[in-house]
Amino acid sequence: MVMLVILPTMVGAAIVVAVVAHIRRSRENKEPIQLGVRQEAPFLRTRDQKEEIVNYATCFLIGDVPRQRTGAVFLVVAALGIVVSGCSKSQATAAMSVPEVEVATVEQRDVPVFNEWVATLDGYVNAQIRPQVSGYIIRQNYTEGSLVRKSQVLFEIDPRPFTAALDRAKGDLAQSQAQLGKSTLDVERDTPLAEARAIAKSQLDNEVQAKLGAQAAVESAKAAVEQAELNLEWTKVTSLVDGIAGIAQVQIGNLVGANSVLTSVSQVDPIKAFFPISEHEYVLAQRKSSAISSGHTISFFGSALDLILTDGSLYPRKGKILLADRQVDPNTGTIRIVAAFPNPGNILRPGQYGRVRVETSMKKGALLLPQSAVAQSQGSYQVAVVGSDHKVSMRAVKTGETVGTMWVIDEGLKPGEQVVVEGLQNLREGTLVTSKPAHLSAGGN
């Protein structure tokens, strides 16, 4: 290790000593030496002079040149450090390579133009489950968040008071029927007697009216029995639709009434999507669509709808427009549109957000560029174009719509130009670069 350090030092010292000796010889010969001038010294300009210095340094190393002063060696070593440092910087600067960048070619093709609107999902039918009788909850018969069927029992209310009420109504009905039977017998018995003037006609009239009153009492008692039966049936609270049942809002033992909401059931297949569009977009959709509106439905660019979920993924099933609201909201200047999407498996749920997308037009001969190639700064956009001379040209562009991972460029580029995709922030105007094609995933739709 010591030899590895000493040997380069001795070599450098030999070179410096050789240079010093050559300077002395040049002075004796009165050759001009210019100091402080940033150029090669005159005494080192010729090939013979440089070879002489090398030979002198070699002799110094092998001992042919006397080493008279030890202090000179330290001076030589210090000078050598300066020389080596300067050489290292020069070599590092010379070794800097031209930066390599990835470029993409500006494409030109026809692309569909899409519009997107923020949508809120909601159940096709949302049913609030309320009891129709008052009482205490004694049982919950469904699993929260599960799929329930129409008429499936969700809750049970204590039926004992209603069973008693039904029994009382049935007793009243029997009593009324008995009274009707007596009145009927009275009328049948006294009718011949009244015709024979054996009894007063007014007595028969009273008996006939009593019979009619008994008949009315029987009908009323029957209605009371039917109401009691309904109340007893309503102690079993059922679902009104097929759908997903929500979390229960009550617990077993709670006293509930007609104003209590026990839970909610939403029909989610299909599921609705509500989104607002501007009045201008509504008029444009009606004008561009070839379909004819009928009833309360509207034509909407004649295209099926896509739903983009909050994670950026595309919902695999297409939707359709159901209806438009009856009026434009005067506060926002928008009209509410309702669409429906098939939802097998109940993947989509009410309350979710997403973006509804529809193809509104086709742009002919559009110039496309990866979004990563466009730099944005204070509302302006620029790209780095690599010319045929391999130099970078910073160019301002005007962007249009986005198509997948690509950006439509309206102004500033020409088809076939090479644009830097990555490392744009490290480039300057006129930077010399070497380019290679970028490996991009398929963008656009």
Image: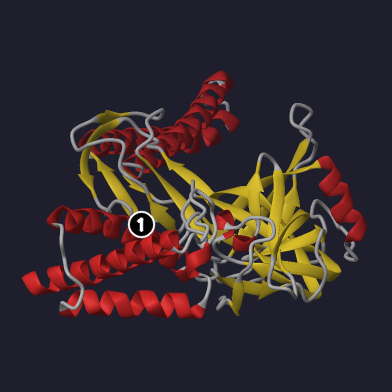
Rendering coords of residue 123 (x, y %): 52, 51
The answer to whether 176 is drawn above or below residue 283 in the figure is: above
Q: State the quadrant of the C terminus.
A: bottom right
Quarter of the figure with residue 370: bottom right
Front-most of residues 28 and 144: 28
Q: Is residue 193 left or right of residue 375?
A: left
Q: State the quadrant of the N terminus.
A: bottom left
Q: Is residue 253 left or right of residue 108?
A: left
Q: Is residue 427 left or right of residue 412?
A: left
The answer to whether 289 is drawn above or below residue 11 in the figure is: above
Rendering coords of residue 353 (x, y %): 53, 49
Rendering coords of residue 42 (x, y %): 53, 64
The answer to whether 420 is drawn above or below residue 251 in the figure is: below
The residue singled out by tag 1 in the image is 152
Residue 350 makes an appearance in the image: yes
Tell me if mark 1 has few (under 14), some (14-19) or many (20+) residues whose alpha carbon lies within 10 angstroms of its own: some
Front-most of residues 273 and 194: 273
Residue 88 makes an appearance in the image: no
Rendering coords of residue 271 (x, y %): 55, 57
Task: Count how many numbered circles sit on residues in the image.
Answer: 1
Furthest-left residue in view? 2
Q: Residue at x 54, y 68 (%)?
A: 99
Q: Residue at x 43, y 75 (%)?
A: 50
> What colour-coding does the image apply?
secondary structure
Quarter of the figure with residue 262: top left
Circle 1: residue type: Gln
Q: Which secondary structure lies at badge 1? A: loop
Quarter of the figure with residue 300: bottom right
